[in-house]
Image (spheres, rainbow, N blue to C red):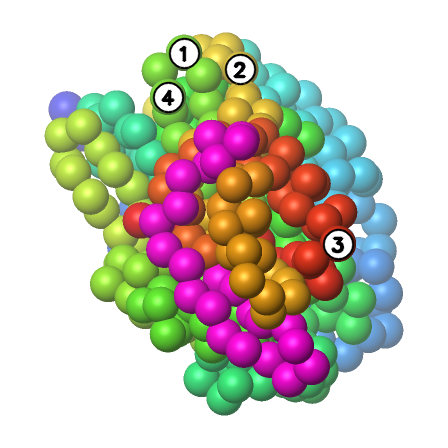
Amino acid sequence: MRVVNPKKQITVGILGLGVVGSGMVRVLTENAADIARKVGLPVVIKRVAVRDLSKSRDVEIDPALLTDRPEDVIDDPEIDILCELIGGVEPAHGYVLRAIQSGKNIVTANKEMMAKAGHDLLHEAEDRKLDFNFEGSVGGGIPIIQPLKQALAANHFTEVMGIVNGTTNYILSKMTAEDADFGDVLAEAQAHGYAEPDPTNDIEGYDAQYKTAILSSIAFTSRVLPESIYVEGITKISRRDIAVARDLGYVVKIVGIGQDLGEALQVRVHPVLLPKGHPLASVNDVYNAIYLKGSAVGDVMFYGRGAGSLPTGSAVVGDIMEIARNIVHGATGHIGCTCYDQKPTLSIDRLRTKYYIRLIAHDRPKVLASLASVFGDFNVSIESVVQRALPGGDAEIVWITHQTLEANLRSALDVIQRLHIVSGIENWIRVEE
C-alpha cells in the first residue's frame, strides 16, 4: 500500500546565507520542479536567518524570508528541516541542539562542529528519531559521507587517505608546475579567493584535520577527536623540496590519512611524498580526492570539486532531499551515529613509514659515513642517498629511508642537527608508497 502523507510541502529553514548558503538556495530554487518530483512533495524555503539584513546577496531571495533573529528559524514549528550553514562550533552547536530538541531534522556543512561535537548531536537526533545529514562537511560536492554510511557500509576499511583541502592543494600544485615559492603562490591564491586573508586554518592543516577526523570516525566506526590527530601544515615546503622530490619520482601533497591497525588507529595530517603513479598524485589545483581501501570493494577513489558555492550547495540540497523523502514516508531517524567502537589513536611517534631527509653538511671525507652511522645507531635503515656539491665547501645530502619508526628517526635527527659537520637539516617529509 502506498503511504499517503498529509503534508503538502517540506519546509526548510536556513541559518546563514554566505558562500555555501547562497549556493544551496540557488540549487534548491533553480531545480525546484525536479526536486519536487524526486521527493514527492515541493521543498520550499520558509525562513533564512542572516547577520546583516542590509547586506547585498550573491543569490536572489525574497527579502520577506530574511530575519536577523536565529530563533525565528529555530523555534518555528512549521519548519521541518534546519540547515546550519554559519560554521564554527559556537553558536552553531547551540542552535543545532536547540533545533533538534524542538523536533527539527538537521542538515549542516559545518566540518569543525561535526569534528568536535557531532557525536553528541547525532545521538541527540537519533534519540528523537530525527535525521541528521552532513555530506557537505567533507569534500564539497564529492559524495563521501553517504557512501561510507550506506553504499559501502558492508566493508571493513583499513585506510582512508585524502586530499581534502583545495587551498593547500592549489598552492602545492602551482609550486610544482611553475617552480614557484610558497609565499608568492599563497599571495596569488588569496588574490583569486582560493585562500582567506588569514590562511592559517588551511596552510597549517586544521581544516584538513577536522575533515580527516570525520572521515576516520565513519570509516573505522570509532570516534576520532581532532586533538588526537597529528597535524602539520605546508609552510615548511620549499621549491627545492618539490624539485628534489620530482627528480626522485615523487610529488609533494598534503593529505589526511587514517589507518585501522586492528587494536588502534593511526590518524594524521601532513605533507607527504607520493610516487607519481599514486592515484592522488595527479589531483591538482583546487580539486579534492578521497582514496579508500575496503575489504570487499578494494581500492576506491572519489574525486571532484572539494569546495565552492555550488558544489557544496549541491551536497547540502542532496541531504535535504534525502531527509524530505524520509519525512514523506515517515522514516526519519533510521541512520544515526555509526561510531560503535572506542579504539585509541596512536601518537605520531608510533608511525612506521619511509622518510625523505634533506640536509646541508660539510663536503669532506667521512662525513657521509658519520651521518649514516648515526642513522644506524637508531635503527634507521637507508634506502638511497644523493649528494650534490654546493658553493663554499658544503654539500646537500638527500636521504630516503626504509620504513622505520618515527620516534627513532626523530632521535637520530636530534643528534645529527647538533653535529659540527652539519650546517642544518633543511626539511624532512614522510613518504607514502
Q: Are marks 2 and 4 in contact (CB under 8 Å)?
A: no
Residue pictured at 77% horizontal, 79% vertical: 56
Q: Earlier in the sequence, mark 3 or mark 2?
A: 2
Amino acid residing under circle 4: Leu
Magenta stretch, residue numbers: 376-398
The answer to whether 393 appears left or right of 244 in the picture is: right
Q: Secondary structure at mark 3?
A: loop
Residue pictured at 59% horizontal, 66% vertical: 364
Amino acid residing under circle 3: His
Query: Alpha-carbon distance for marks 4 and 3?
Result: 40 Å
Query: On the image, numbered disc 3 is attached to which residue?
Result: 420
Image position, residue 382 (x, y; %): 40, 46
Bin the neighbour count of mark 2 within 10 Å (Cα to Cα): few under 14, some 14-19, many 20 and up: some
Q: Earlier in the sequence, mark 4 or mark 3?
A: 4
Q: Secondary structure at mark 2?
A: loop
* Mark 1 vs mark 3: in front: 3
Amino acid residing under circle 2: Pro
Query: From what the image shows, is residue 146 above or below residue 218?
Result: below
- Along the line of sight, which residue is nearer the eye, 281 or 354? 354
Q: Are marks 1 and 4 in contact (CB under 8 Å)?
A: yes
Query: Which mark, by number, is residue 263?
Result: 1
- Along the line of sight, which residue is nearer the eye, 218 or 179? 179
Query: Which mark, by number, is residue 242?
Result: none
Looking at the image, which residue sits at the far front? Answer: 365
Bin the neighbour count of mark 1 within 10 Å (Cα to Cα): few under 14, some 14-19, many 20 and up: few
Q: Secondary structure at mark 1?
A: loop
Query: On the image, numbered disc 4 is attached to which residue?
Result: 261
Query: Which mark, by number, is residue 344?
Result: 2
Query: Alpha-carbon distance for marks 1 and 2?
Result: 8 Å
Q: Are marks 1 and 2 in contact (CB under 8 Å)?
A: yes
